[in-house]
Image (cartoon, coloured by chain):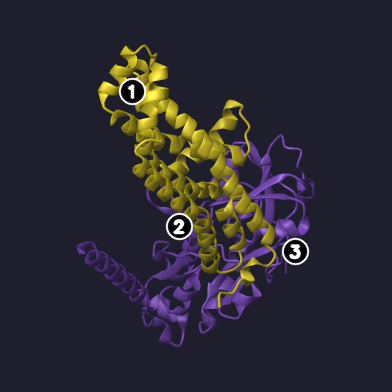
């Protein structure tokens, strides 16, 4: 039988940690989706400076370690006079990092919609934004969902980066409890808690994918 | 299903590697310890083998400028080699950490441990300790303009330390409502302090002094609220070596060599009341 003795005295830390992990994940999920969409639109806008910015953004944040980015925000922002809690620093860092992947997923999805669709939409009198909103994005969406789902699962796991900046997440709680006892069973326990969050997410993504592939449209 | 084969193969390979890694760390004694007198054995060998830290600034650290291991403890051991073997270079330094040092000493790989090792009742059951040569204690590092003057002032304040260390428990025992922040290591904790993410950093003053020398905008405040006496570790079967080391420490404390070395590294006078015998004391024990 798995011995839960290590939890003694740390119950509150684990509860707080679990809630923090959920909170950061939700926060970063919304923000990274918004940021990622904006960057994806930049990259396909046809406006050179915006394209350059989008490319630089994606390549920079996708190709440097998340831990370094978050630590850099954590110690760098105060020097610029911006004081944020570890929770917010972690959420923003995670959002920016994840948004670079999401931007790529969205861009790929949009670009796989045949060019003729945009041309037809524009010639029927829709503006660029309207054409995106009513013609391109609905078609692109079902191509985007599977990679997007993967990013959200990664995001939940990556929220453990908060442990490095004393952010009080689930992994941090494990490290605190592991100060004076064997950390192995604690990490196993915490891994199960992460699974509790990521498996429903995984199943949800699979469900949406199946539903949309059948329906053909949204 | 070709990928299954590959998966099975890589798992098998990984496990084989892990087994091999465990097997190769077996003890390799060098046999010298069998001699009746450990001091004679060292003299016959012509060099002293000491386990020291390579990563602890001011005590034992590798200077990146010239790749030499330097520090207060290194100088102490060189002085010992000089007095025992007539040449301070007749010494071999081996890097140890808190997990390996007792094993290496008992296995005969090293003659002595001089590696910021606190004398504890538990360790005294395993090895012998020389007299105290440095009294460390948990203290606070704060910005020089900080209102924190003593550990009592940290109530409700954000205080950093490293994960895995007992420093967090100790300060919580003294100030229960301290807002403790744990970082991966002391370098990260110090960076957080300099960034203003925490109000103070707490651990042994021996570590804090090193940080303070890196950035003079920070200062140590408050009395020690734990007692961490450092002693030189000697194998229990080498009583003559223990006696030799104790006499050596008494000698250098009398003739001023100790004071010179202390001032060289810590930029201040050594404490007048260094006890001979002491063990770890903390608010949690």
User: Callout 1: few (<14), some (14-19), or many (20+) C-alpha neighbours within 10 Å?
Assistant: some
Q: Mark 3 belongs to which subunit? A: B
The answer to whether residue B257 is visible is: no
Q: Are marks 1 and 3 in contact (CB under 8 Å)?
A: no
Q: Are marks 1 and 2 in contact (CB under 8 Å)?
A: no
Q: Earlier in the sequence, mark 3 or mark 2?
A: 2
Please give the name of the residue rendered at 49% of the width and 62% of the height, measured from the top-left corner: B79
Q: Colour of chain A?
A: yellow
The answer to whether residue A216 is visible is: yes
What mark, if any, has residue B54 been given in the picture?
A: 2
Q: Is residue B140 left or right of residue A92?
A: right
User: Callout 3: few (<14), some (14-19), or many (20+) C-alpha neighbours within 10 Å?
Assistant: few
What mark, if any, has residue A44 been given in the picture?
A: 1
| Real-space Cα separation, disc 3 to disc 2, in angstroms | 30 Å
Of the pair A97 and A38, the residue shown nearer to us? A38
| Real-space Cα separation, disc 1 to disc 2, in angstroms | 53 Å
The x, y position of residue B31, in whole percent, is 37, 83
Of the pair B283 and B133, the residue shown nearer to us? B283
The x, y position of residue B218, in whole percent, is 64, 39
Of the pair B115 and B17, the residue shown nearer to us? B17
Q: Which residue is farthest left?
A: B2
Q: Give the number of the mark in front: 3 or 2.
A: 3
What mark, if any, has residue B228 been given in the picture?
A: none
Chain identifier for the purple-coloured part of the image: B
Label 3: which residue?
B283
Q: Is residue B88 left or right of residue A90?
A: left
The x, y position of residue B198, in whole percent, is 65, 42
Please give the name of the residue rendered at 46% of the width and 62% of the height, measured from the top-left corner: B78
The x, y position of residue B119, in whole percent, is 62, 70
Q: Is residue B174 above or below residue B14?
A: above
Rendering quarter of residue B212: top right
Do discs 1 and 2 share a chain?
A: no
């Amino acid at each position: 039988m798995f011995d839960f003795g290590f939890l003694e005295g740390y119950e509150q830390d684990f509860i707080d940690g679990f809630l923090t992990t959920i909170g950061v994940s939700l926060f970063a999920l919304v923000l990274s989706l918004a940021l990622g969409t904006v960057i994806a639109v930049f990259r396909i806008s046809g406006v050179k400076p915006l394209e350059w910015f989008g490319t630089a953004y994606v390549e920079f944040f996708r190709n440097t370690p998340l831990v370094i980015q978050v630590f850099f925000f954590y110690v760098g922002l105060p020097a610029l006079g911006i004081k944020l809690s570890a929770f917010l620093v972690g959420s923003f860092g995670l959002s920016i990092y994840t948004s670079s992947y999401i931007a790529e997923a969205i861009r790929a999805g949009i670009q796989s919609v045949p060019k003729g669709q945009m041309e037809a939409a524009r010639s029927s009198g829709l503006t660029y934004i309207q054409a995106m909103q009513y013609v391109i994005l609905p078609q692109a969406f079902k191509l985007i969902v599977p990679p997007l789902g993967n990013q959200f699962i990664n995001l939940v796991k990556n929220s453990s980066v908060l442990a490095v900046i004393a952010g009080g997440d689930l992994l941090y709680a494990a490290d605190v409890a592991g100060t004076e006892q064997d950390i192995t069973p604690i990490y196993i326990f915490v891994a199960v808690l992460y699974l509790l969050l990521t498996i429903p997410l995984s199943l949800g993504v699979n469900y949406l994918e199946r539903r949309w592939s059948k329906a053909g449209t949204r | 299903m070709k990928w299954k084969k590959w998966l099975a193969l890589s798992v098998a390979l990984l496990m084989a590697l892990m087994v091999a890694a465990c097997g190769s760390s077996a003890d390799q004694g060098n046999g010298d310890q069998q001699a009746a007198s450990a001091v004679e054995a060292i003299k016959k060998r012509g060099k002293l083998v000491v386990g020291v830290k390579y990563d602890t600034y001011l005590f034992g650290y590798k200077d990146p400028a010239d790749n030499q291991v330097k520090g207060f403890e290194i100088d102490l051991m060189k002085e010992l080699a000089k007095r025992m073997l007539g040449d301070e270079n007749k010494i071999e330094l081996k890097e140890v950490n808190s997990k390996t040092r007792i094993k290496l000493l008992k296995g005969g790989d090293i003659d002595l441990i001089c590696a910021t090792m606190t004398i504890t009742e538990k360790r005294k059951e395993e090895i012998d300790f020389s007299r105290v040569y440095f009294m460390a204690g948990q203290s606070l590092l704060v910005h020089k303009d900080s209102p924190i003057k003593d550990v009592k002032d940290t109530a409700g304040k954000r205080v950093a330390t490293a994960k895995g260390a007992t420093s967090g428990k100790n300060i919580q025992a003294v100030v229960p409502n301290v807002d403790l922040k744990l970082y991966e290591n002391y370098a990260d904790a110090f960076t957080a302090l300099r960034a203003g993410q925490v109000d103070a950093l707490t651990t042994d003053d021996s570590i804090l002094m090193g940080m303070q020398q890196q950035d003079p905008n920070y200062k140590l405040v408050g009395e020690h609220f734990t007692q961490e006496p450092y002693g030189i570790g000697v194998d229990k079967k080498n009583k003559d070596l223990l006696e030799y080391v104790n006499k050596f420490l008494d000698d250098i404390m009398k003739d001023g060599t100790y004071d010179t070395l202390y001032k060289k590294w810590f930029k201040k006078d050594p404490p007048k009341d260094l006890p001979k015998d002491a063990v770890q004391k903390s608010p949690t024990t």
